[in-house]
Amino acid sequence: MTRLIPSEIETKWQTAWEEAGCFLAKRDPGKPKYYVLEMFPYPSGNLHIGHVRNYAMGDVVARYKKVTGHAVLHPMGWDAFGMPAENGAMASGVHPKDYTYTNIDNMRDQFRRIGLSFDWTREIASCDPEYYGQQQALFLDMLDAGLVDRKNAQVNWDPVDMTVLANEQVIDGKGWRSGAEVERRELTQWFFKISDMSEELLSALDGLENWPAKVRLMQENWIGKSRGLEMAFDLSAPAFGQERIEVYTTRPDTLMGAGFVGISADHPLAKALAAENPEVAEFCDTCRKGGTTAAAIEKAEKIGYDTGLTVKHPLDESWELPVWIANFILMDYGTGAIFGCPAHDQRDLDFSRKYDLPVKNTFFAIGDETPVGKEAFVPPKTEKVKWVDHFAGLDEATGQEAIDATIAFAEKAGWGTGKTQYRLRDWGLSRQRYWGCPIPIVHCDDCGVVPEKKENLPVELPYDVTFDIPGNPLDRHPTWRDCACPACGKPAKRETDTMDTFVDSSWYYARFTAPHAKGPTDMEEAAYWMNVDQYIGGVEHAILHLLYSRFFARAMQITGHLPETAIEPFDALFTQGMVTHAIYKSWSEEKIGGLGGLGGQHLPIYHYPEEVELKGDKAFLKLTGKEVEIIPSAKMSKSKNNVVNPLDIIDAFGADTARWFVLSDSPPERDVEWTASGAEASFKHLSRVYALSVRVAEGGGAGQGDEDLLRAMHKTIHGVTQDIESFGFNAAIAKLYAFTSTLSKAKASDAVMAQAMRVLAQLMAPVTPHLGEEIWAMQGGEGLLIDAPWPVADEAMLVEDTVTMPIQINGKRRAEISVAADASKEAIEQIALAHEAVVKALDGGTPKKLIVVPGRIVNVVV
RNA sequence: GCGGGCGUGAUGGAAUGGUAGACAUACCAGACUUAAAAUCUGUUGGGGCGUAGCCCCGUGUGGGUUCGAGUCCCACCGCCCGCACCA
């Protein structure tokens, strides 16, 4: 065979690895362990090019760690519960279970074709009762340990379909199916008490040195620790049995600028008012319209209702402030009530201008006492400002100094207490849906809420359900709810809510260490394999999934399912970018929509890549020749018809090409643009490498420049090793291109050529494992490449005798000199000053300044 | 709205505060060929001049720090991710 035929070599080597059991994770006392994990996918049924990139990265790490002498654990499973299966059932009548398992089978086959080094014997699916039964056991242990709570929470309620909607099912405040305006409604729900761990989850972030700083920062902001003041405004006259309104503020220093007191529509006082005044009730209902998302609530127009009640200012009995109900105040943060300080908060200012409430500066910029107009004055808390009659006696001070002084002042005077507050809320885990892990709870008329007994686990989902009407099929199942009360034995009813799918993904990494253990984990296995040494996944999971996993690892330690050493489950985290693809867009000839030819618009039409022919930088429809617009680097999306199916690429060019391409060019943490020409070019390169190997195997080398080739080889080993260690896969590939070029031009002896070729195969193998094995075998490598140790660079071969250094004149490169690598600063200075460009620039004078960084640069300032 | 990130040739991108554009794609030119494809070789940031060479401009925009800024700081513009029931 003189031509690279991927379909032949790829199945051949995949079979060889399988038969040799290369990727089975085995405990080995003679080796350090290494656990590499990529976020497990939702089994959509179709491999996405983004999957190829994500898993190719993990595979490079796993294969590299294996050949560098580690006992590797590299498992794969399925995040298999969730809404798509139910939506599929509603749309096409396929049962969620059948839909999911069919998809899993398809995707597993597709995954295998990529040649990923997974230990498939450890495969788990979160929808498997063996998995979710253990999750139920965990839930019961957490309940026992006081980590679970039951309380009210708001959900999106579709009043027409009479069902709870997920945020993504609410479009512009309306239900996706019914089109009805969504309301926020309270429901009793189960919660994990993650907020009790706020401080711990925050302070432990410091120890996560191998996490991206941006992810730690996002988590820090999400947890949102703040130091503020809790205080009360006395009502001028008691109302509804209340004498005061408790508020929490992070800016107590601006108390003298208070213009109003605002309460949430769900505040007890608002509810009491609503009960007796229909107008207030109607206003509160309006506030509850739209979805529950923070973005929707904060983007909504700010509206308020004057309750007519007033409160007294704590520092001045005679100063009365109006009490307003406002839609931008959330009941679940702080006390559900605030005082508005319009001069120093944009939201409060907009609100005050709208309702004509007073605006009063409490401080000014030093030297500029212009009162606030349309823009609130909000300087950084570290900037000094000039205070107006500050009660704590401040004149010029920063915001932070004022906050501290105010808290101390209020505590001493007795009208307020300093309080540390966290933005992090408890994790609501109840979902009113079928395709999830049932919450193992029983409701008994006599005993109330009772946990199911562990010996009755798993509480399995029934198969005989229908999706013809909206709502949770478990609610309307004729018999499934019926059970015996675990406490008293009388007939009782099961909880029909299932768990948030984030629960499934919060502990799967631990389950992989013993996927068939009789409890949630096997402590011995967990102690050996945990933590995950390298975790890889998308940044979109930076907050929720990763924070929940950190919480769960702690909870599992408390309940005895993980050792103490594993409370931070992921030692190192890498967040990779997306794969994007150009969108090909044109506009409809006809105007669509509108009445009687009036109105209407030309609507966009999105074309599949295969419908389009590219000529230079323009694109034309193959069918009509019409030019279409190219929108580059867009996120792949089904509705935009720009999703690339990696199987087509694998069919055409093989898995190695697909892997090579998705890892080249773009740095792993950034998005990568998929282009068909790029994939073809990758294939051409791999074919060249193969052809080169055939040539080398034939021999006939001239025996010249052995030393040069070996130097180049060691330099490449060194560079590629460093790049793989630091996730610079694109840089590693660039070096492999360069070395291939050097090797193809080399005229070294046959033995050295073959050695260089084997090393090239080894260095390429983490990315292109099949081609690597093929070349390894062709060049007489012993055994399988995957069992051969990674080449080590000879340090002596890396040292250069001379280096070229650029000379800058006034910061601009003007010349370069060649000096000995170990030349002293003084020697370099002399050589540089003698250079004709420098002599010319100095024109007889002396340099103002001379900067010499040995080995790097000389800068002459004239 | 809030939090985080990104922005470099025609294109993907490279560059511990130290030669901007490595490596690749595309294009163009050449070799091979009856021809094309394939393959191989070479050129290519923009502008200018007295064209073996030299000069100016250039990393979204505008300012700043520095001997020196793609890199650090500030403001703005654009795009992407997250915002607690998408996974």
Image (cartoon, coloured by chain):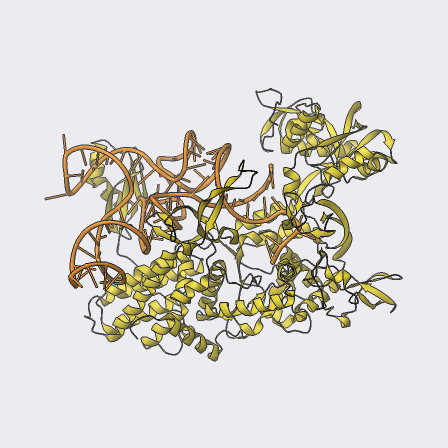
Chain colours: A yellow, B orange
Residue A682: x and y in percent read 36, 61
Against A106, residue A195 (above or below) is above
Residue A180: x and y in percent read 69, 45
For the image, the number of numbered tags is 0
Against A621, residue A341 (above or below) is above
Q: Quadrant of the N terminus of chain A?
A: bottom left
Residue at the extreme front of the image, as rendered:
A596
Residue A118: x and y in percent read 51, 70
Left or right, A674 with respect to A705, comes to right
Of B6 and A802, the residue lying toward us: B6
Of A507 and A276, the residue lying toward us: A276
Q: Is residue A472 visible?
A: yes
Left or right, B57 with respect to A228, comes to left
Against A807, residue A661 (above or below) is below
Q: Is residue A756 visible?
A: no
Residue A402 occupies quadrant: top right
Left or right, B48 with respect to A418, comes to left
Q: Quadrant of the C terminus of chain A?
A: top left
Left or right, A856 with respect to A520, comes to left
Of A770 and A424, the residue lying toward us: A770
Residue A87: x and y in percent read 63, 58
